[in-house]
Amino acid sequence: MLKTLALAATAAAIVSTSALADYYVVQEKATGKCKVVETRPTETTWLQIGPLAFKTRDEAEKQVTVICTTKRP
């Protein structure tokens, strides 16, 4: 019983975590190329641009062309 409850709680946590995922628009400093990622960039070669986060991937993809128009330093 306890094992089943623990497995159910773990499964619920995994599902809710992916449902609450945020999407970020990042730009590579060297090339200026932009892409959408699910985690905030921690590498120094990528720069987060735009608002803090988008709630859906579609929202982020639509905004890439709007907020990623120029190469940033």
Image: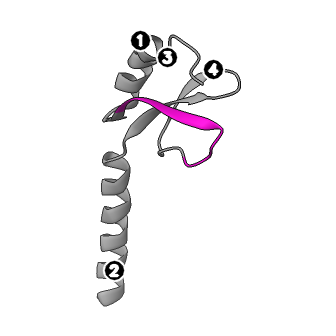
Residue 47 belongs to the span the image colors magenta = yes
Crowd band around label 4 with a 10 angstrom C-alpha radius: few (<14), some (14–19), many (20+):
some
- Tell me the mark number nearer the camera, choosing from 1 and 4: 4
Q: Disc 3 or 4, which lies upstream in sequence?
A: 4
Q: Earlier in the sequence, mark 1 or mark 2?
A: 2
Q: Quadrant of residue 14?
A: bottom left
| Identity of the residue furthest to the right in this view | 30
The local secondary structure at tag 1 comes to helix
The colour scheme used to paint the residues is: one colour
Q: Mark 4 highlights which residue?
A: 32
* Tag 3 secondary structure: loop
Please state which of the two labelled residues, at mark 4 or mark 2, is closer to the viewer.
Answer: 4
Residue 37 spot, x, y in % from top left: 51, 37
**Secondary structure type for disc 2:** helix
- On residue 68, which mark appears? 3
What's the residue at 59%, 16% (across, down)?
Answer: 71
User: Which amino acid type is marked by label 3?
Assistant: Cys
Q: Nearer the viewer, mark 1 or mark 2?
A: 1
67 relative to 8, above or below: above
Start-end of magenta stretch = 42-51
Q: Nearer the viewer, residue 65 or 10?
A: 65
Whether residues under marks 3 and 4 lie with C-beta atoms below 8 angstroms apart, the answer is: no
- Residue 56 point in image, percent of width and height: 34, 32
Query: Which label lies toward us, 3 or 2?
Result: 3
Distance, label 3 to label 4, CA atoms, is 8 Å
Measured along the vertical axis of the image, is residue 2 above or below residue 39? below
Q: Position of residue 49 (x, y in %)?
A: 45, 28
Q: Quadrant of residue 31?
A: top right
Q: Label 2 neighbourhood size at 10 Å, few (<14), some (14-19), many (20+)?
A: few
Task: Give neighbour class at mark 3: few <14, some 14-19, many 20+ (Cα, 10 Å).
Answer: some
Q: Earlier in the sequence, mark 3 or mark 2?
A: 2
The residue where tag 2 is placed is 6
